[in-house]
Image (spheres, rainbow, N blue to C red):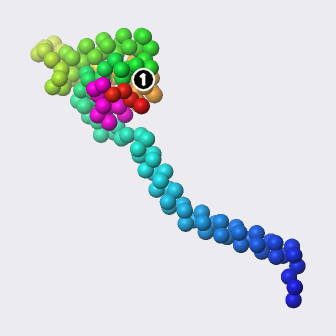
Amino acid sequence: MRIPQHSRSSYLVRMEHLLLLRLIRSLFPVVLAFVGTTTARAQPDTTHLTSVQLQDCLLLTGPSTWEALQLSPDQLRRIQFVQDACKEECDVKSAQKQPNPISNADGTTVMAEVKNILTTDQYRAWMAHCAEGRSGGQAPK
C-alpha cells in the first residue's frame, strides 16, 4: 500500500510541529530562569531602603550623580536647597542637627521634596543608586 505524497508531507509537517513543541517545552524553564535573573540584576530592590538610609544617601549624593541624572538647572538649584535643609533636619549621623524645640522635623518633609523635584525616572534611578550603596562619587548608570 502506498501513501499518497500529500499525506506524507502533512505527516512530516505534523512531526516537525511536535518536535518543535517538545523543544520549546524543554527550553521554557531555562528561558524563564534566565529572564528572571537578568531582570533582578537590571533593577535593584529599593523597597528595603529606610527613610534614614535615603536621607543619608541624599546628604552624600554629589554633583556627578545629579549630572548623570540630567537634572535641569532649576532642579539642581532646588535639590541643593533640600540637601542644605537635610543637614539640619534629617535623622542621620552625618547631619549636623541642631536641637530645635520649634521644629519636630524628622527628614520626611525633606524626602517628600526630593520626590517632588525629581521626575519619576530620575527618582527611580536615584533610589537604585542609593540601593547599590554608591552615594559617594559614583554616578548612576
The number of discs equals: 1
Q: Could you tell me which residue is drawn at 30 percent across and 31 percent down? A: 134
Q: Quadrant of residue 138?
A: top left
Coordinates of residue 31 in the picture (x, y in percent): 52, 56
Question: Which residue occupies the extreme front position in the image?
Answer: 137
Magenta segment's dominant SS is loop
Left or right of residue 110: residue 26: right
Is-magenta flag for residue 122? Answer: no
**Quadrant of the drawing holding the N terminus:** bottom right
Coordinates of residue 48 in the picture (x, y in percent): 30, 40
Is-magenta flag for residue 134? Answer: yes
Can residue 108 be seen here? The reply is no
Which of the two residues, 36 or 99, is positioned nearer the viewer here? 36
Coordinates of residue 40 in the picture (x, y in percent): 41, 46
- SS under mark 1: loop
Can residue 31 be seen here? The reply is yes
Q: Could you tell me which residue is drawn at 50 percent across and 61 percent down? A: 29
Left or right of residue 32: residue 5: right
Q: Which amino acid does label 1 sit on?
A: Leu
Left or right of residue 1: residue 15: left
Mark 1 surroundings within 10 Å by alpha-carbon count, few (fewer than 14), some (14 through 19), many (20 or more): some
Q: Could you tell me which residue is drawn at 42 percent across and 23 percent down? A: 69
Residue interval drawn in magenta: 128-137
Q: Could you tell me which residue is drawn at 45 percent across and 51 percent down? A: 36
Residue ID for mark 1 = 69
Q: In which quarter of the image is residue 109?
A: top left
Coordinates of residue 41 in the picture (x, y in percent): 41, 44
Whether 6 is drawn above or below 139: the answer is below
Which of the two residues, 24 or 51, is positioned nearer the viewer here? 24
